[in-house]
Image (spheres, rainbow, N blue to C red):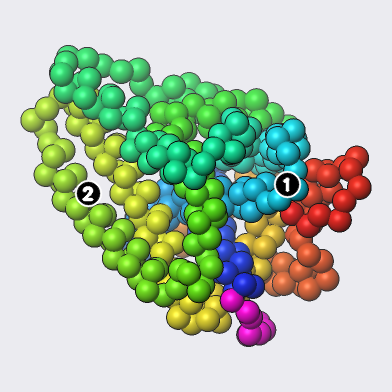
Amino acid sequence: MFNRESVTQTTNRYLAIDALRGLAIAGIFLYHSVSRFNFPSTYATSASILLSLDVFIEKAAYFLLFGKMFGIFSFLFGYTYQLQNGVPRGPGKARIIWRMILLLLFGLFNSLFIPMGDILVFYAIIGILITPLFFFNTSMLFLLAVILLLQPFELYRTFVSFANPSLSFSSAYHSGLQNEINQTLVNGNACEIIKANLVKGVPASLLWNFQSGRITQIPGLFILGIVAARKGIYHARLFGRKYWLKMSLIFGSAIAIVWLVKISAVSNRGSSVCNDSLNATLSLWINTLSTMLIVSVFTLLYYINRGRLFHPLSYLGKASLTNYIGQSVMGALFFAPFGLNLANTTGIAFSVLLTIILLLCQILFSRAWLGKHKKGPIETLWHYLTWIGKKTTKDS
């Protein structure tokens, strides 16, 4: 079905990145289907085998996908940010900010279809805030990434609550907005739901990112992606199979160590606040390390197989923004109350099966489109609007 064309090392490194981005896009779509794109579900089945299958898929999706696919997406977003903006005769600070403002608008559009907001809005804000740091040297950026990925806010909560067991912190800041959104999803019409997704969902998403620790995790992965691009880690001659095997072993060992620390350190002997904060910190560390383990193992397998096995994913990755937004639109059409309302009429297993079919359709569409164009439809629009008012043949 798919061409298995041979590629040069230079081209292969970009296909590896595209394929990895495609994996993230596919994983995000699958996880969203398990959660019914955040639309409330009242579906119930009396068939025990289907119920068991749904429970198994839900647990497997949480273990394999939650916090990891968005982690890969964040890492590669920073990688691409560097490739687009860090080249000689690059766009300059003003146009970088303009590019991120356009992404913010895409994110707001995408938020119309997703309850609890969209991550693209947060990405755009990070891209704007990080612009002054973008021109710092690589060592300083790497140090900043490490500090952010260590979860300083969660560590602070852990130490403070350990020193003062009676201390308590505010509950989830997004809960009130989430409850209002859920009420609208149950009782509102299409216009009311779309309005709630935008007006209440976007701030709820930003608050959840703060509450969940992603407020530092995502920027840390973003900056780590910039560092990786500067180091040229996808240059096959410099960073080949041995490098990715070594990184796989390092990240795998680190996960095992942190996991052992987690099960031994988190107990009921301390205050609940301290235990919760420590558990959240270590869980975020495991998610970050798991993200980088997936990146390393996937890249290693890609090089071993010379890209043949994962090549279809590169079509998703090359048109990642188009496919990501397209998934949100399809999610609303299939799962929303104003669409087919599958959130209330089907189980998780059926949702995943439907998603796999839709992913295959996206791959085929992307393959056909990219056979005639350099970029996906939305990527083309983003590129055009980025350079509007300036005559250029730049293909960034």
Q: Which residues are magenta?
A: 1-9
| Circle on res. 81 | none
- The reply, left or right, for residue 291 in relation to residue 253 is right
Q: Residue at x 70, y 35 (%)?
A: 93
Label 1 sits on what residue type?
Answer: Gly
Instruction: Please tell me whether residue 65 is drawn above or below residue 39 in the rendered image.
Output: below
Instruction: Please tell me whether residue 281 is drawn above or below residue 47 in the rendered image.
Output: above
- Magenta-highlighted stretch: main secondary structure? loop
User: If you read the primary sequence from the N terminus, does the residue marked by circle 1 or circle 2 appear first?
Assistant: 1
Give the residue pinned by disc 2: 258
- The reply, left or right, for residue 165 in relation to residue 117 is left
Location of residue 369 in the rendering, given as x and y in whole percent from the top left corner: 78, 68
Location of residue 272 in the rendering, given as x and y in whole percent from the top left corner: 19, 26
Mark 2: few, some, or many residues within 10 Å (few <14, many ≥20)? some
Res. 246 image quadrant? bottom left
* Camera sees residue 262: yes
- In the image, residue 374 lies in the stretch drawn in magenta: no
Give the residue pinned by disc 1: 90
Q: Quadrant of the N terminus?
A: bottom right
The extreme left residue here reads 269
* Camera sees residue 334: no
Q: Nearer the viewer, mark 1 or mark 2?
A: 1
Location of residue 6 in the rendering, given as x and y in whole percent from the top left corner: 63, 85
- What secondary structure is found at the residue carrying circle 1? loop
Label 2 sits on what residue type?
Answer: Val
Location of residue 136 in the rendering, given as x and y in whole percent from the top left corner: 54, 37
- What secondary structure is found at the residue carrying circle 2? helix
